[in-house]
Image (cartoon, rainbow, N blue to C red):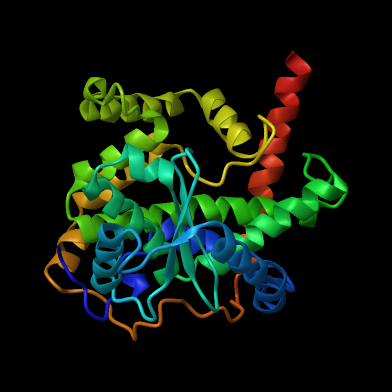
């Protein structure tokens, strides 16, 4: 497997991730909350829970998984090594959190469903979040959504527009951050089909009928999904689905979209140059700076205009029903 000594997260960061984070961070007071709130309210209790109710992976616990994990940590040049936990949960899912003490949780559903190469892709994906400093923002998004839901504020056309825009910005960024983490998986695995097959299986894979799932058909499904955008109404429906039309905001892009973006990057000159060792370098801190961004007012204004425009389209649809 390739090893990218000294690689900076900026070397493979998706531009949509960067743009969405800049807009998010520009909201007044955001960085103060990001620095102080998460560590004391969310991170420490969660670590206590994981230590008490999951298996911490190590040389004598899930040794095969631990070996793969350490190789991924090495390949992405992450220091210090995060902690890895396995949770007894049949849902094929995993996540990375923590700022002071970053950690990854991988469910047994992942271990049972995927082969070793695909598990490695999942581990590299989650390590990509840690490498890019995503975890503190993910925790903030979780808190912001919980707080807004408790206050009953998360609806279109509400009076407190800035609050809704901030929540939208959190989840818009969170979905774009997944595209960067997918690139991290691609760098480590260096095999496009393996990364895409892990996405396919997590979307709807079956252990019993695995031999009846076709990656090529899933890729074709991705192409058909992209073609839906030819109808402008479908774009509105996609926005609504992502942003709570079915009862909850989605934290991840649809797998078929991730396949589309990853295929584009795998064929790019940028990816080829990184493989050759021509990439931006930085100290292996494993996290980006969380200081406030400046001169981002235009991004915020663009975000607000986008929400207002979509609100008008939604109102038109509601009036026509």
In-image side of 88 versus 75 (left or right): right
Q: Is residue 69 above or below residue 232?
A: below
Query: What percent of the width, then of the height, locates residue 274?
Result: 19, 67
Does residue 31 appear in this view? yes
In-image side of 117 versus 304 (left or right): left
Please, which residue is most extreme toward the top here? 321
In-image side of 312 versus 194 (left or right): right
Please, which residue is most extreme toward the bottom here? 283
In-image side of 28 versus 22 (left or right): right
Residue at the (39%, 81%) spot, across then down: 80
> Residue 21, located in which quarter of the rendered image?
bottom right
- Which quadrant would the N terminus be assigned to in this image? bottom left
Does residue 166 appear in this view? no
Query: What percent of the width, then of the height, locates residue 177?
Result: 46, 57
> Which of 82 and 168 lies nearest the eye of the viewer?
82
> Which of 72 and 269 lies nearest the eye of the viewer?
72
Please, which residue is most extreme toward the left here? 276
> Residue 86, located in which quarter of the rendered image?
bottom left
Residue at the (34%, 34%) spot, across then down: 201
Residue at the (15%, 66%) spot, across then down: 2
Residue at the (65%, 78%) spot, across then down: 35
């Amino acid at each position: 497997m390739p090893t990218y000594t000294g690689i900076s997260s900026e070397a493979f960061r998706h531009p949509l991730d960067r743009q969405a984070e800049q807009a998010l961070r520009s909201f007044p007071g955001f960085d103060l909350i990001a620095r102080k709130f998460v560590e004391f309210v969310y991170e420490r209790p969660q670590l206590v829970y994981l230590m008490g109710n999951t298996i911490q992976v190590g040389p004598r616990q899930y040794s095969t998984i631990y070996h793969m994990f350490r190789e991924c940590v090495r390949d992405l040049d992450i220091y210090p090594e995060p902690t890895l936990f396995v949770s007894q949960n049949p849902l094929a899912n995993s996540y990375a959190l923590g700022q002071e003490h970053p950690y990854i949780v991988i469910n047994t559903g992942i271990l049972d469903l995927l082969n070793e190469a695909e598990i490695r892709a999942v581990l590299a994906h989650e390590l990509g979040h840690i490498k890019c400093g995503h975890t503190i923002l993910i925790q903030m998004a979780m808190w912001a959504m919980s707080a807004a839901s408790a206050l009953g504020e998360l609806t279109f056309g509400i009076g407190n527009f800035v609050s809704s825009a901030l929540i939208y910005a959190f989840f818009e960024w969170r979905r774009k951050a997944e595209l960067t983490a997918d690139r991290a998986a691609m760098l480590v695995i260096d095999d496009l089909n393996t990364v895409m097959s892990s996405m396919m299986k997590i979307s709807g894979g079956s252990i019993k009928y695995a031999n009846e799932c076709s990656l090529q058909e899933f890729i074709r499904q991705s192409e058909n999904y992209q073609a839906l955008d030819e109808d402008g109404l479908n774009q509105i429906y996609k926005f609504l689905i992502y942003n709570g039309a079915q009862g909850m905001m989605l934290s991840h892009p649809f797998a078929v979209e991730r396949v589309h973006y990853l295929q584009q990057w795998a064929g790019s000159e940028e990816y080829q140059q990184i493989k050759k060792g021509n990439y931006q370098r930085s100290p292996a801190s494993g996290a980006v700076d969380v200081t406030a961004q400046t001169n981002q007012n235009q991004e915020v204004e663009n975000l607000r205009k986008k929400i207002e425009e979509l609100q008008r389209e939604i109102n038109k649809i509601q009036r026509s029903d």
